[in-house]
Image (spheres, grey):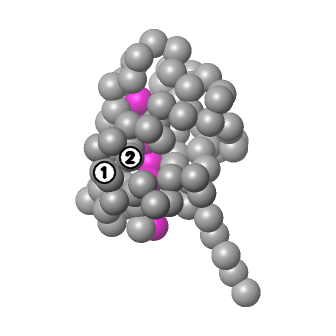
Amino acid sequence: MKVKVLVFAHIKEIVGSEVIEMDLPDEPRGSEIISKLVDDYPDISPQKHSLMLSMNGEYIGWDDLLIANSEIAVLTPVSGG
């Protein structure tokens, strides 16, 4: 299954784009996006466990199934003051 993944902040800087196309196996889970991202861009590895995912604007877990043709985003932690 092909998916388009949006990335932001320092992840976007590492990747060099705000949209990545990924080729994933059928019925992928969120964790497969994170794993492929780290495999393709090893500099992301230190932040791996702090990344969150959203699908169609709703937060999802790493174990959740991805739905074809959805908007997937990889989100970094945000802090404010």
| x then y, percent, for residue 28 | 51, 21
Q: Main secondary structure of the magenta part?
A: strand
What residue appears at the point 56 percent right and 33 percent down from the top-left corner?
30
**Label 2: which residue?**
38
Judge whether 47 appears above or below 73 on screen.
below
Let me know if residue 71 appears in the view. no
Q: Residues within 10 Å of mark 2 (few under 14, many from 20)?
A: some
| Image quadrant in which you'd find residue 20 | top left
Residue 79 tag number: none
The amino acid at mark 1 is Tyr
User: What secondary structure is marked by label 2?
Assistant: helix
Q: Is 5 contained in the magenta span? A: yes
| x then y, percent, for residue 29 | 56, 26
- Quadrant occupied by the N terminus: top left
Pointer 1 with pointer 2, Cβ within 8 A: yes
| x then y, percent, for residue 81 | 73, 87
| Image quadrant in which you'd find residue 65 | top right
What residue appears at the point 52 percent right and 46 percent down from the top-left corner?
73
User: What secondary structure is marked by label 1?
Assistant: loop
| Image quadrant in which you'd find residue 58 | top right
What residue range appears in magenta? 3-9
Let me know if residue 63 appears in the view. yes
Q: Residues within 10 Å of mark 1 (few under 14, many from 20)?
A: few
User: Going by the image, does 30 lie left or right of 38?
Assistant: right
**Label 1: which residue?**
41
